[in-house]
Amino acid sequence: MAFKVAKTKEEGLAQLKELVGAFEKGIKTFRDSKYNETQLRNDFVDSLLMSFGWDVDNEAGKNQFLRDVIQEESIEVEDEKSKKNPDYTLRVQGLRKLFVEAKKPYVDITKSAKAAFQTRRYGWNANLGISVLTNFDKLIIYDCRHKPNANEDERIARISVFEFSNYVEAFDEIYDLISFESASNGTLDDLFSIYERVGQTFDDYFLEQIESWRERLALSAVQRNERLGSEDINFLIQRLLNRIIFLRICEDRTIEKFETLKNIQNYDELKTLFKQSDKKYNSGLFDFIEDNLSLNIQIDSEVLIEIFNELYYPLSPYDFIVVDPTILSQIYEKFLGSHVVLDEGRQLSIVSEPEVVASNGVVPTPKIIVEQIVKETLTPLVSGKNSGELALLKIADICCGSGTFLISIYDFLLKATIERSIEEGITDVELIYEIAENTYGLTLKAKRNVIEQSIYGVDINPYATEVTEFSLLLKLLEGESGASIDHFIGQYATKVLPSLHNNIKCGNSLVDDKFFEFMPEAIENDLVLYRVKPFDWNLEFPFLNDTNGFDAIVGNPPYVRIQNLVKYSPEEVKYYQNDLSGFAVAKKETIDKYYVFIQRAIGLLNPTGFLGYIVPNKFFIIKGGKALRKFISESCSFSKIIHFGVTQVFPDRSTYTAILILQKEDRDTFKFKRIKKITPDILGTGDGYLEYEKNDFTNEPWVFLSPGTKAIFDKLNSGHVQPLKSLADICVGLQTSKDPVYIFTPEGETENTFILNSNGEIKEIEKGICLPCVYDLSFGLFDTINPNAQMIFPYVIENGKAEVISEDDFIQNYPLCWDYLNEHRDELEKRSINGKDPKWYQFGRSQSLTRFHDSSKLIWHVLSTKPSYVLDELNIQFTGGGNGPYYSLVNNSNYSILYFMGILSHPLFENMVKAGASEFRGAYYSHGKQFIENIPIKIIDEQNLEEVNSYKNIIKSVKGLIAAKNQYNETYGARRVILQRKLDILNNTLIESVNKLYSISSDEFTTVLHDEMFTNELTAEE
């Protein structure tokens, strides 16, 4: 049988039928013990995978880094100490998606606990969702999120079992689980998410373990070494863990003898092992000149033995052969979010870093996003360069954390160097060698050169820089063996690993040596210096004087609002905002730390450099982002923007982000793509980009429209129109700063009072100090609303001004309310209250106190999935600041407020709001003031009969819709169907009237209404 990769699902099914028939025909032979695994793979498993779209033989001719399938030589593994890779690694765009482990048909894999453990162990260590075990006779899918145990029943964590005789019947189900199409378009991830997660994934378990090891080692060090302080403890334990984990991983990679650590019995033996390792590896990892402290402490043997045992089977299922160094780096990213603290009584505790608290915890950047940023940033940089020019590149992450981005940079440069060397016909065995047919690798010497010459990182956390070096060194040894290490030492008479102290630095990327001009006394204050860590770039990286900057900077800068940063590093914030710092983006009080990182990064690039960051996208449109938009538009050019909209990049977070690729060189246009779902194939292609003119994006909000919609919106904004804000006031609601105290739902009433339940006690409040309001009330477009609550309003309005009721008048006229508020006085006094000499019982803010008295208004939800404008003529109050929950419009013109309501309800103008608005999960977007106020309102030419009639028809339709909606909401049963039809007719009439007034054609209406830029695909989770 000679199969090819199935190009379609139908072709795959046809091939599978033929394959099943062949197996059935020779089943007796295939189930014989003499028929081995190699024969099975050649005869059936390769073809099985091809039937599901996997390019087993690389028919597409992809380079070695993007091949869909990586095959391991078939070997027999008889004991737990032997090491091999999975039989098949299935990948999309170079990313591992699942493993396939093959056994000969003689083995009943449904009853083989050993085979099940091996399959699950591979998948779990690689942090994959599922893996496959097959002998073709049967195919088993295992959930690899469940930590495997060799003593578990083989049925644990099984998702599905398929008999070969049922492959054809179950083709659709199997296809969704293991096909290339399913893995590449996200179907597999969506399908797998419905399975209940049981047990611990590799990253959760390993993080839990290293945190436990840190605490146990720290406790032992504190108890056995009285002179050690918190800083010493953190340094020692971090170094100790790095060394232990490094050597354990080297064991699984066959660089060190397996179970070397497990045979260590005490700390003296461990120090001897470390000294031997230093002679072999160098690099600073085992350097005891710098780290003399480690030689002069004691650690309990029992603690060490416990930890070593937990690193091996059967206490753990670790197999570091398949563990991705990026996953380890991301685990360390979380680990570095806390540190050991000793109090005065030498009691030990683990506390979070202040910046971690300020940003609500550590969330590492997913690998697929890291690789995309690196790819998008570096691809144009390496294009057209030969191997010699590639070696001169200088690339940095200036907030490197545990080194995740630097690992990806190394990977990218490694691949680029191999590809360029092959193209140039370089055969120097000191640089490149052939691993297998058409598969090449760089020598250890060449890999060292890539890291030493091209990769640089800075982080303010000293333990992070330690881990970054550790992560890069582990990555450097990937693919090496004991034999290759011995060969390198023998050939070059040098130690294996380079020192990275000149590449990875600890310091504050945002605070340079000008800090000492800003705060001269800081040089005498070690606490300030340690907290701020000023960093002189040209001194630390002297080559910057010659290169005029880095060729590229990539990363994910911290998202910390200045209000939070000032709590733990006030000197730093003051420096940002001082002219000495040069940070034009930091003058406002509402900035975020990533603003400053973007400006710093751009300043550190050479004239042809590129920046690749993932950052919150809200600065594109909010008022507080104006300075950053101005800086970017004037200081560099856009190369590419990948906008994730409401699609969540970071797990368990609601952060709305975009990838920014910026470059120093001037360019006229840039590319933009909106991502609705994160899948390898979408991120991996150049499809779906729109092109924009750079000069169209200034300090004004950045709104990305498709060309057709932009032309229509430009038309609507031209002609005889005025912005809504020139004809009406758009207002926030009343802001009490303590709504639960001031707003209540009456449980009853008397002639003069409302009755309420306050914390289980019945209270009365005078009606004279209350105003009707809406509170936490949902409503839709054209609804009629009624107050559902009462608001205590401690003001009197005279001559259009609101004055706080004096204490004497309050006590005399509203004694019940005075007593009630006094019971809440403590919490009311904790509020921030605006104004001179504020009284403790007044509202926190004074906006809109007189706006809604005796005037009609529109009210709407700030966050909604569609327009929700309602007319209020009952003087209803409501709450709301800049973020809602409600906004309102008060008419200042001679036009009817219903005219504005009709225009705002129109789908094209709603899409105009949506185009420039902040987006949120669940398809919600903001209807805040800045997104509403510039809607173009047609100024009616009173001499133009058509315009006058359209104006009147809009008002008539809106009146009809309000009345019909009220009827609809109060009607049940069959009559609702008729009323719904009436609403549809009135709504269509309204749309037609607005279309006619603005000269909107049916084609233009359809273009905007169905523009994909305005649609959001919801994930299964949402």
Image (cartoon, grey):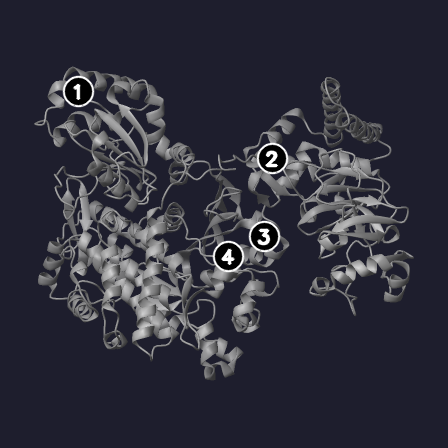
Q: Nearest the camera: 291 or 589? A: 291
C-beta proximity under 8 Å, tags 2 and 3: no
First in sequence: mark 1 vs mark 2: 1
First in sequence: mark 4 vs mark 2: 4
- The vertical placement of 289 against 217, above or below, is below
- Name the residue that disc number 1 marks: 1
Q: Which amino acid does label 2 sit on?
A: Thr
Question: Label 3: few (<14), some or many (≥20) within 10 Å?
Answer: some
First in sequence: mark 1 vs mark 4: 1
C-beta proximity under 8 Å, tags 3 and 4: no
Residue 374 position, x and y percent, is: 37, 50
Quarter holding residue 347: bottom left
- Name the residue that disc number 3 marks: 698
Task: Determine whether, in the image, residue 364 is placed left or right of residue 563.
Answer: left
Identify the residue shown where x is 58% and y is 64%.
563
Q: What residue type is labelled 4?
A: Asn
Distance (Cα) linking label 2 and label 3: 20 Å
Q: Nearer the viewer, mark 1 or mark 4?
A: 4
- Name the residue that disc number 4 marks: 360
Quarter holding residue 458: bottom left
Q: Is residue 846 visible?
A: yes
Residue 490 position, x and y percent, is: 8, 62
C-beta proximity under 8 Å, tags 4 and 2: no
